[in-house]
């Protein structure tokens, strides 16, 4: 199976009823593999502002059956490697305050709380 197909399969499985096919692959993504199968992925954007070049993590997911086995740590290691290669100034991610596992993972990598409020306007509503 091609990476694109595997990537889509993974998304479909993870997103269940919220799944919507995407027409093109995201520009940047990183994944972790076990036995030739994608078991975790991250979608990434590089964003330039007036003050910095940031790598923004949009999605960061490890398959349920494979959590707590170090794959999230491996995926983050890949992202940090990519950030260094792309010479970005920082890595940013937004997470729910209640997401203890993700918070523990980011803290382990010394991400700092920016104490921001995060808003979103869905145009379809
Ligand atoms: C968050 C997530 C990616 C972590 O992936 P993972 O493969 O389980 O992570 P790891 O096994 O590498 O564990 C990383 C760290 O997370 C913490 N952690 C993992 N499971 C935990 C749990 N059940 N409770 C508390 N902390 C936990 C630990 O600090 C661990 O590091 P350590 O083992 O060195 O102490 C995974 O739970 C997931 O896909 N969640 C759903 C999607 C999501 O919420 N994504 C993040 C939002 S962007």
Image (cartoon, rainbow, N blue to C red):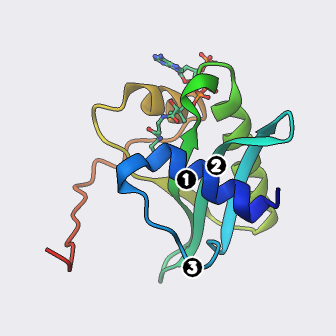
In this figure, which residue is indicated by the disc labeled 3?
23
Q: Is residue 67 above or below residue 45?
A: above
In this figure, which residue is indicated by the disc labeled 1?
11
Mark whose residue sits in front, 1 or 2: 1
N-terminal of the pair, mark 1 or mark 2, is 1
N-terminal of the pair, mark 2 or mark 3, is 3
Mark whose residue sits in front, 2 or 3: 3
N-terminal of the pair, mark 1 or mark 3, is 1
Q: Is residue 91 above or below residue 95?
A: below
Q: Quadrant of residue 91?
A: bottom right
Q: Separation of disc 1 and disc 3 at Cα? A: 13 Å
Q: Quadrant of residue 33?
A: top right
Q: Nearer the viewer, residue 60 or 39?
A: 39
Q: Is residue 19 left or right of residue 76?
A: left
Q: Nearer the viewer, residue 60 or 35?
A: 35
In this figure, which residue is indicated by the disc labeled 2?
41
| Residue drawn at 47 percent across, 83 percent down | 50
| Residue drawn at 59 percent across, 34 percent down | 63
Instruction: Find residue 22 and name its label.
Output: none
Where residue 56 appears, as percent x and y from the top left, is: 53, 62
List the single residue furthest toward the right.
36
Q: Is residue 108 left or right of residue 113?
A: right
Q: Separation of disc 2 and disc 3 at Cα? A: 18 Å
Q: Nearer the viewer, residue 48 or 12?
A: 12
Contact between marks 1 and 2 (CB within 8 A): the answer is: yes
List the single residue furthest toward the bottom.
50
């Amino acid at each position: 199976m091609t990476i694109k197909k595997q990537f889509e399969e993974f998304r479909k499985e993870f997103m269940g009823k919220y799944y919507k096919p995407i027409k093109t692959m995201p520009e940047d993504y990183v994944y972790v593999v076990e036995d030739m199968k994608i078991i975790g992925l991250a979608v990434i954007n590089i964003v330039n502002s007036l003050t910095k070049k940031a790598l923004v993590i949009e999605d960061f997911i490890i398959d349920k059956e494979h959590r707590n086995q170090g794959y999230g740590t491996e995926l983050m290691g890949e992202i940090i490697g990519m950030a260094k290669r792309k010479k970005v100034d920082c890595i940013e991610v937004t997470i729910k305050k209640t997401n203890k596992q993700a918070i523990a993972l980011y803290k382990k990598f010394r991400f700092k709380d920016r104490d921001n409020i995060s808003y979103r306007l869905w145009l379809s509503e």
